Image: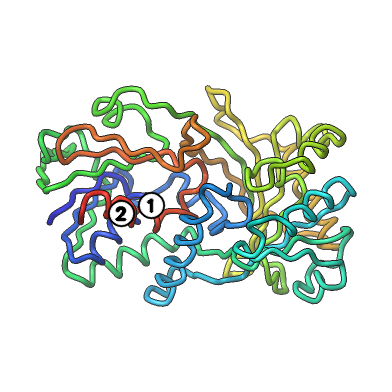
Amino acid sequence: MRLVIIGGGILGTAHAFAAVRRGHEVVQLEREVEARGATVRNFGLVWVSGRAAGELAITLRSRQLWEEIGGRVPGVGFRPAGSITLVRTEAELAVAEAAAAGPTAAERGFALLDPDRVRALNPALRGKFLAGLHCSTDAAVESRQALPALRAFMEASGRYSFYAGTEARTVTGTTVVDDRGRRFTGDVVLVCPGAAHSGLARELVGDMPFRRVRLQMMQTAPLGEQLTTAIADGDSFRYYPGFAGPALDSLAREESQTFTAAQHKMQLLCVQRLHGGLTIGDTHEYDEPFAFDVDEAPYDHLTAVAEELLGRKLPPIVRRWAGVYSQSIDPAAIVTRVRAADGVWVVTGPGGRGMTLGPALGEETADLLNL
């Protein structure tokens, strides 16, 4: 079977990878020279810890697939580093305790660590905290190099072609015509538009039940030592459904975020890149139109929290950026697949989980289409 995939981000590439692994032929089109959206503007985290119970099985499956992919394609930079969510108040500690004792704790690899055990696991954490919720199943990939590595692997099969700088303009039947008038015909067309809800995606399926979410992030120069796990702060409990429950309700009711964190709906996430620098974020902005520039206050907040947890000054900030991802307004939806016509599907809306869930979503779609 021959697939034409529109969109070169993680969802499009994951669907291509699933199809090529099953012996099919894939042509993938990307309007930019290289994907520039949320796929490369993220942490590269394969994040199991905060996922809701209803999506835990697919998240663990995706984690397994990423590990298999990392063995076949070393360039994606997969590493099973785990994470530690560091808590600084008694109310946050109660949430961590509830998670560590919860019904899915064993599946997630949760363990509540005192400060000495946290530092034994991650010696770079020399700052102030009461405890750490360790998640051994969390992992990371290198978001800026994963897609080129996956494409090179698929190209070696002889059944994959990538057309960069190619904008799909129309889909008639299962034939795609690009902005140069070239025609690409397949048995199936998959449109993976990311946060681009207008244009071709809207022409195919109309207005979709999504919102867009904007975030701000930054990257430091090399830390000079190894951060052996990803880290998060207690504010992250507020933004992940896997921690819902009475303890989180008490936290929200009794303990406010700082002004800046609340205004920008913030959490601290931090992961060390293979080059030694730290990727740190993030914010959540939901009301459009989004600003074209970035706000400095969140970066000051993130720097202060990271330095408190590390117990040292951060290296210089070398990059700052904003990104936008697509999120279904149905909180129960992991991704949305809309059948636009016979053999034509639009797939989008993983809501900031694209990197985590990409391989499993590609596999799921392949099963759905009997590939």
- Residue ID at (37%, 67%): 149
Q: Quadrant of residue 342?
A: top left
Q: How many marks?
A: 2
Label 1 belongs to which residue? 361
Which secondary structure lies at badge 2?
helix
Nearest the viewer among 255 and 14 is: 255
Is 357 situated left or right of 371 in this image?
right
Rendered image: mark on residue 47: none
- Residue at 17 percent across and 65 percent down: it is 159
Residue 252 in which image quadrant: top right
Q: Does residue 30 appear to the left or right of 110 in the view shown? A: left
Whether residue 221 is visible: no
Q: Give x and y (percent) for residue 181.
A: 11, 38
Q: Does the image show residue 184?
A: yes
Marks 1/2 in contact by CB < 8 Å: the verdict is: yes
**Which of pointers 1 and 2 indicates the residue nearer the eye?**
1
The three-letter amino acid code for the residue at tag 1 is Leu
User: Neighbour class for label 1 at 10 Å: few (<14), some, many (≥20)?
Assistant: many
Figure colour scheme: rainbow
Please tell me whether residue 145 is drawn above or below residue 7 in the rendered image: below
Which tag, 1 or 2, sits closer to the chain's start?
A: 2
Residue depicted at 26% across the width and 66% down the height: 21
Along the line of sight, the residue nearer the viewer: 219 or 214: 214
Which residue is at 74% across, 59% downward? 100
Disc 2 target residue: 15
- Mark 2 surroundings within 10 Å by alpha-carbon count, few (fewer than 14), some (14 through 19), many (20 or more): many
